[in-house]
Each structure stands twice: as structure tokens, then as C-alpha cells.
Amino acid sequence: MLRLIFRRVLVAIPTLMLVSMLVFMLQKILPGDPVLTLAGEERDPAVLDYLREKYRLNDPLPMQYGAWGLQVLRGNLGKSLRTDVPVTALIAQKLPVTLQLAAMSMFFALLVGIPMGIVAAVRKGSWVEAGANMVALSGMSIPNFWLGILLIMVVSVQWKLLPASGYVSPFEDFWLSVRTMLMPSLVLSTAIAAYLMRHTRSAMLEALSADYVRTARAKGVAPRHVVLLHALRNALIPIVTLVTLLFGELLAGAVLTEQVFTIPGFGKLIVDAVFTRDYAVVQGVVLCVAGGFIALNLLADVLYVWVNPRLRHA
């Protein structure tokens, strides 16, 4: 296990370096000049020269990247060009919000998607499978922003059951925080649950047709044990990959949902940074997201070994 983790970490280091180089170089070709935004309406040439010198924007790109990279190695992601707040402070402020939203969304998706996929595979060809496929297709087809607005109109405005928008930290008021995040997490979980259902169904159908499942049935093993202990454990391997990738997408891809429900999360931070040409924030956020994806892939590799012990000797 330790050897597996060590190999993955060795691969992660050049991957993070490549991501940082791509992000640093690509954002420089974006149209617009962040210094003009910082200088205000007057745009005094002396002020423009001072700002470019302060943020080293006159240096060649390799020197800018090298200086930024050395600061990153020291744990310093720089300061926001727009607010002069350290990027690490912004990430520490926004990331827990999106982590809570992503965790709740994934919880609801796992709670619905995997059982539906198992039932659809076991009851193949029945009305249960047809209904599950219809629900999954609906979940993948309904836009998140439309579903979010509909829930706000019905649940919040008409029924007055849940808050329509905003965010409350669970450390301030736990139950109010859960109630506030319930609707956006349900909105995000619909498509994820649909993907999980389809992949679980396909993996379970393949596992249920395997020789070891037929042997277990021939030996008189209870049907429930055949499905849950034999087939599901082997079918979980591709599902683990899907869950980790979907969770990583939730960390950076909940922009529309955060906008609809006015949630000050990670997605809104990166979108605002791109629009305002806030280079330091974009670089720090993308690097953090890339690190999150790599950590989730490492977690998936560890879960593979836990789910399927045969991989310990691979």
C-alpha cells in the first residue's frame, strides 16, 4: 500500500508542475489588462508603471513563473490583485462552503443512485428497470439552474419550508446550515445520481453474468448475498472511479448552482477572478483544484485495494 501511494505521489509532482505552467501561461493570453482595472478611472501612467513594477508584470514570463513557483513552494500563493487579500485566505474562506455543498450532494446521490442501479440490474427487463432508466434520463436532462429556480419558487416562496438563498456556517447554526444547503445539494445530486445509477447498473449486469456469481448461485448461496457480497463488491471498482471524479467536478463545477442560491463558494470565487483578471487568485484556485483531483485519484487507488484485495499483489 505504501509503495502504491509513493508511486502515485511521484506521478503527482510533475502533473502539478505541468498544470501550474499551463495555467500561468494560458491566462496571460487572455484579453484585457488587470493593471487598468486596478488603476481606476483616471489611469495615471505613473500609477500604471508602479503597479506593473509592484506585481512584476514587466518581467519576462519565465521569470514571473519562477518567482511565483518559489513562493508556492513556501506555501504562499500571493495576494489578490483586486482586494490585496492573500489567496490562501480566500481559499480557506470559500473552500469549506463548496466542500459542504459537494459532500451533501454526493451523499444524496449515493443514497439514490447506487440502490437504483442495483435494483435495475437485478430486475432487468422489468418495469422497475424501465422506471429507473426514465428517472436517470430525467436527472441528466434537467438543467440545474432551472431546477434550482423551480425549487425556490415552490419550496421557499409558496410553501415557505426552506430558505431561498444564502449560506450559514454549520459552526454557527448546524440545522439552519443544513436547511440552507438542502435545496442546492438536491439540485446538484440529481445528475450525479443519474450517472451513478447508469454506471452501477452496467457494472452490476456484467458482474451478475460472471462465472463466480453463477457458481455461488449453484452452491445455494442466498440471492441477497450473491448480489451484495459477490457481485456488488466487484462492480464497485469502476463506481469508485466515477465517484471520485464527480466529487472533484463538484468542487469546481457548482458555479451555476452557487449563483442561483447565492452561495459564496469556490466556483463563484474562480469565476469572479477570471472576469477581473485576478491572476494570483486564478492560479491559486486552479492549482488547489488540480491538487484536489490528484488527491481524489490517490484515494480511489487506495479504495480499489480495499474493495478488491487481489490488487494488493498487482
Image (spheres, grey):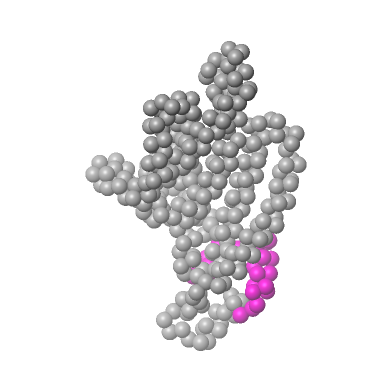
302 vs 257, left or right, is: right
Q: Position of residue 84 (x, y in %)?
A: 52, 69
Position in image of residue 193 (x %, y %): 45, 39
Left or right of residue 287: residue 269: left
The quarter holding residue 210 reads top right
Residue 266 location (% of width, % of height): 49, 55
- Was residue 194 drawn as part of the magenta stretch in this picture? no
Residues drawn in magenta: 58-87
Q: Nearer the viewer, residue 288 or 78?
A: 288
Q: Is residue 164 above or below residue 207?
A: below
Q: Along the horizontal axis of the image, is 126 left or right of 282?
A: left
76 falls in the magenta region: yes
| Outermost residue, left side | 158
| Quarter occupied by the N terminus | top right
Q: Quarter-wise, where is residue 259 in the image?
A: bottom left
> In percent of the image, x 55 and y 79: which residue is there?
51
For the question of whether residue 65 can be seen, the reply is: yes
- In the rendering, at what x and y percent does residue 167 appear? 40, 50
Residue at 66% of width from left, 61% of height from top?
18
